[in-house]
Structures are given as C-alpha cells and as structure tokens.
Amino acid sequence: MQKTLLLSGASGLVGSALITALDPQTHRVLQLVRHPVHGESEHVSWSPGAHAIEREKLDGLSAVVHLAGEPIAAKRWNPEQKARIRDSRVEGTRLLAEALAAAQNKPEVLVCASAIGWYGDRGSETLTESSDPGEGFLAEVTRDWEKAADPAREAGIRVVHLRLGVVLSPDGGALAKMLLPFRVGLGGPLGDGRNFMSWVALPDVVSIIKEALANSQMNGAYNVTAPHPVNSREFAKTLGKVLHRPAVIPLPAPAIRIGLGEMGETLLLHSAKVLPERLTGEVGYDFQYPELYPALEALL
C-alpha cells in the first residue's frame, strides 16, 4: 500500500537525497513549498510568516519529514539574519505541528530536523542525548525548535528529532565548500585544530530518516553523527590524504572572527564531540560510514 509523505525542505541537500532514496511504488511524496506551481497537486503551500498552510491537504498523511529552515551559513549573522534563522525553524515547526494536530486523520509520525547546536560549545566533553543543553544562539534556537513540535506530540503523533551533525556530501554543505581550497593545496585545520567536528555522511542521514519513519519505537531526540568524531586537525589531515594534497595551512581563529563574525566563530571554531548513543544502542543502527577516511573516500 502506497503511503503519502509530506516533505519540507525538499530542494535542500538532505531533502533531495531522501526523495531519490524513496521508492515511488511505496511512497507518494508531497512537497511543502512557499511558491507552488499552479495546478500542481503534489505540492502543499504554506507561509510560516503569515501563519498560513493548506490544511485541507494535511488530512490523511502517513508521515511528515520536516527539514526546512533558513541556511545558517548563508551570510553573516546580524540581528535580522538571526531572526530569520530562528523564525524559519521555530515558527515554521509550530505552524506545521499545530496544523497536523488539528487534522482529522493525523499522520503516525513527524520526523523533524534538529541540530547538534543544541549542545553549544563544549570542548572535548563527550556528549550524548542525555547531556545537558548548551548555551549560545544556536543552542537556544535548537531548544525552541524542538519544543515547537509539542502540539503534534500532545495530539498523539510520534515525534522524532534528528540532531544533525556536519552532513558530508560533495554536492553541498560544508564539504563542498572545502573542496576547492583543499584541491589547490590551501586546506588546513580551523583555528588551533583542537575543536571537534561531529560529522555524518549523507547516505547515513537518509537511512536514519527512513528508519525513523518505519520504526515505531523511535521517539524523541537522536544524535545523527558518526560514532567517531574527529577534531579539525584530523579532519583536514584526512581530507588532504583522500585528495592527495597537503593540508597544513591553518585558517587562524582571528581571521575567522574578523571575516565571518559570530557566524564563523560558532560554526567553525566551536567544538562538540557528539556520539549517536541512542541510534547505536537503542535502535541498533549500523552506520554505513562510521570512520572518516572511508566515508570521504566513498563520497569523493
């Protein structure tokens, strides 16, 4: 029997990969979009800023995967950009959760993107889902983002929050931006190189989303990070080895702070050593790419 899945963020790195991975014989995908194509029945229109959504199309959905949000690395963070980042996640999730809660025939599950920004800047501390929340802008946004799904949870919908680490793919995100400088021999660690990067390969992200949709026992927050995080120095060394290029030119912390401001400080210099304890323990998920070198070798 074909299931109907509503997907937000379908044009993004993870969303487009998920669509490719879903069997059209078993899943009909409706895309939640701001600007629908006229007459296109496979789209559901919404406008979080106007608190508007085509509620009549939400009745009878099997599942919802919510990935939409303003890109956090698109530009420097001024007050307006930070408001866009927060509102796109918090208000968008709240609107969707409230609309799903009000549907006569509710979906079984809502899978929401979240982020390891929840933990803040924690140095070399080992972090799991049972760790305390962190401090700072992204930590606050992520806490509010997850809480915004409460209306769906309270209506009996199973809600899964996937706290994504740095998603690795040559097609977009952090890795795509690194490739050019590394390929011309200008790559290297960020800052002092000791800050941890909790990464995950895109194929694992897609597989974990599919697991969250199918596994009725999954509920609450899960760290979507490979079991072996590395620091910035080790990441640079490994990427250089895969590309057969030197990777010894550091990007100094002062240059990052001057060039990119708070956004650069948070995304490039903060450290979070995050482990997927619930996925590997409770769920028994077997990562396709648990180690960085084989992951980069396969992806590149």
Image (tube, rainbow, N blue to C red):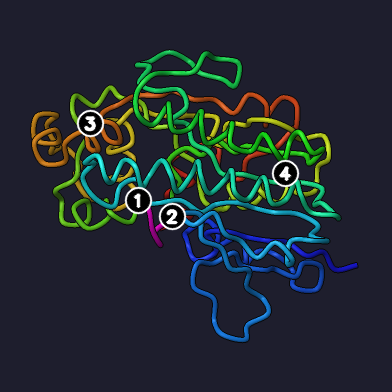
Residue, disc 3? 265
Sooner in the amino-acid sequence: mark 4 or mark 3? 4
Q: Main secondary structure of the magenta part?
A: loop
Q: Is residue 172 magenta?
A: yes
Q: Residue at x 49, y 36 (%)?
A: 115
So how many labels did they put on this image? 4
- Graded by Cα atoms within 10 Å as few (under 14), some (14 to 19) or many (20 or more), the crowding at tag 4 reads many
Sooner in the amino-acid sequence: mark 4 or mark 2? 2
From the image, state whether disc 2 or disc 3 is nearer to you.
3
Mark 3 falls on what kind of element?
helix
Q: Position of residue 21 (x, y in %)?
A: 65, 64
Sooner in the amino-acid sequence: mark 4 or mark 1? 1
Residue, disc 1? 175
From the image, state whether disc 1 or disc 3 is nearer to you.
3
**Residue range (magenta):** 169-173
Q: Position of residue 177 (x, y in %)?
A: 28, 54
